Image: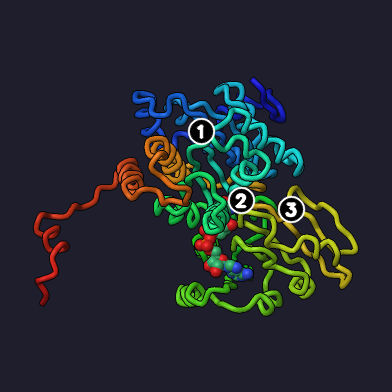
């Protein structure tokens, strides 16, 4: 079996951490138990390009239990947990191609390696595998029946491909399931982004001026969690509806040009490019901390930052200090990459439980229905979403009411009013 991981000796440590995460993933465990009986993925080859974390390891175990053959590469050069990569190779016999801190060339080489199994299904987090398949590896396209996409940025890229008529196989947009983005993006990113910020810097959030750019699902989570820690949170937005929502949720909203004068910590989470630009960086306060939780490292103008600096040095793990020519120091975390995955461990397992339950069930759905799907981006079937929510509630010991026959009739009718 071919693989490329940093150090196989880390495998046993990785296994313990995978098992630790597994205990918080009861929905996925339920699916895994069913998969091992029914084997719905027998004979299916899956190339997964996901963050190599303990939760991903549990997902791959479920897919293997379902009969799939799986290969894995990283969806970000800085998010790989090397002990997990080693354990996947040693204990689960999964070919893994991922080393934390790999350069861009290796990152893409690893995507190519994970495609060597000639996948029927691709699983992406950011659409990099799909982009390679539609570029350099079109020879593999005839064998691919469908793919899944985990994150907002990936879904946005894939919708553009669909619109331009270049998408060559159907995709299930896992991100868009309610039991994914309402929880993973909001509570997962909310908590783990602050976790990454704190682990990297140990700053006190109470009383600090924190600027959150983007009030989407992730931004809402980050802003409310930072507020809960006592920060004075400022939101920047470009969408008037989202901006209004932020105002009514109690945040100060202003353009970045104004926020830079007050902000002490800046967190970008927009999925857009060049949110913090040279003109902003120049005017920030001395000691400002910059980090990003959006998918790609394009939200902070890294080139601009480098060009403004007269001196650069690493002052702590994951913290680079840039001394600008105006004498002010700016601190960039995790090279502007996803701070929650690079400087912490990513989302807690209990929220990834739902995201990856959607992944596992979407793969099963794709295998069963791909022949009827066009080359488009599809939502996760509503029934899957509801099933994931029900299983999660059951695992938490929470019961809910169900509609009475009279209520069902009432909701179906239009005749009765006051
Ligand atoms: N760090 C993680 O673990 C993690 C988890 C889930 C999603 N993500 C990524 O986070 C990003 C955001 O995801 P989301 O689900 O919140 O998306 P979303 O579409 O719900 O929200 C993005 C928001 O950013 C706003 N925005 C766009 N350009 C802006 C700009 N220049 N300035 C201010 N606001 C701007 C948009 O108006 C929108 O409201 C994506 O890249 C997504 O892939 C990261």
> Residue 396's image quarter?
top left
- Which residue corresponds to mark 3? 335
The N terminus - image quarter: top right
Q: Mark 1 or 2, which is nearer the eye?
A: 1
Q: Earlier in the sequence, mark 3 or mark 2?
A: 3
What distance separates the C-alpha of mark 1 from that of mark 2?
31 Å
What distance separates the C-alpha of mark 3 from that of mark 2?
12 Å
> Residue 130's image quarter?
top right
Label 2 residue near ligand 1, CB within 8 Å? yes
Q: Position of residue 170 (x, y in %)?
A: 47, 45
Left or right: 37 as drawn, with respect to 199: left
Q: Position of residue 120 (x, y in %)?
A: 51, 33
Q: Position of residue 381 (x, y in %)?
A: 36, 48
The C terminus - image quarter: bottom left
Res 120 label: 1
- Which residue corresponds to mark 2? 340
């Amino acid at each position: 079996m071919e693989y490329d991981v940093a150090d196989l000796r880390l495998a046993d440590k990785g296994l313990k951490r995978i098992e630790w995460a597994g205990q918080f993933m009861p929905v996925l465990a339920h699916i895994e138990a069913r998969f091992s009986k029914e084997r719905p993925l027998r004979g299916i080859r899956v190339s997964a390009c996901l963050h190599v974390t303990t939760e991903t390891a549990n997902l791959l175990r479920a897919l293997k239990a379902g009969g799939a053959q799986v290969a894995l590469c990283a969806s970000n050069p800085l998010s790989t947990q090397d002990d997990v990569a080693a354990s996947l190779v040693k204990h689960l016999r999964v070919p893994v191609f991922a080393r934390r801190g790999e350069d861009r060339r290796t990152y893409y080489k690893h995507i190519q390696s994970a495609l060597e199994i000639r996948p029927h299904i691709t699983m992406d987090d950011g659409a990099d595998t799909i982009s390679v398949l539609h570029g350099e590896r079109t020879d593999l396209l005839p064998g691919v029946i469908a793919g899944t996409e985990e994150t907002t940025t990936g879904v946005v890229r894939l919708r553009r491909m669909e619109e331009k008529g270049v998408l060559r196989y159907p995709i299930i947009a896992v991100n868009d399931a309610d039991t994914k983005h309402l929880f993973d993006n909001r509570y997962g990113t909310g908590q783990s982004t602050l976790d990454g910020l704190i682990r990297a810097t140990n700053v006190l959030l109470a009383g600090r001026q924190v600027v959150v750019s983007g009030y989407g699902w992730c931004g809402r989570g980050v802003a409310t969690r930072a507020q809960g820690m006592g920060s004075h949170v400022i939101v920047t937005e470009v969408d008037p509806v989202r901006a209004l929502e932020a105002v009514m949720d109690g945040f100060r909203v202003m353009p970045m040009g104004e926020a830079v004068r007050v902000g002490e910590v800046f967190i970008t989470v927009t999925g857009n490019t060049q949110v913090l630009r040279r003109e902003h960086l120049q005017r920030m306060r001395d000691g400002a901390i910059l980090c990003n939780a959006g998918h790609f490292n394009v939200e902070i103008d890294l080139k601009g930052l480098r060009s403004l600096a007269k001196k650069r040095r690493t002052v702590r793990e994951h913290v680079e200090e840039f001394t600008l020519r105006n004498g002010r120091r700016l601190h960039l975390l995790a090279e502007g990459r996803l701070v929650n995955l690079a400087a912490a461990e990513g989302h807690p397992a209990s929220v990834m439980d739902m995201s990856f339950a959607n992944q596992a069930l979407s793969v099963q759905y794709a295998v069963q229905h791909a022949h009827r799907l066009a080359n488009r981006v599809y939502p996760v079937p509503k029934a899957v979403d509801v099933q994931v929510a029900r299983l999660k509630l059951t695992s938490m010991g929470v019961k809910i009411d169900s509609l009475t026959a009279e209520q069902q009739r009432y909701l179906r009718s239009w005749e009765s009013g006051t």
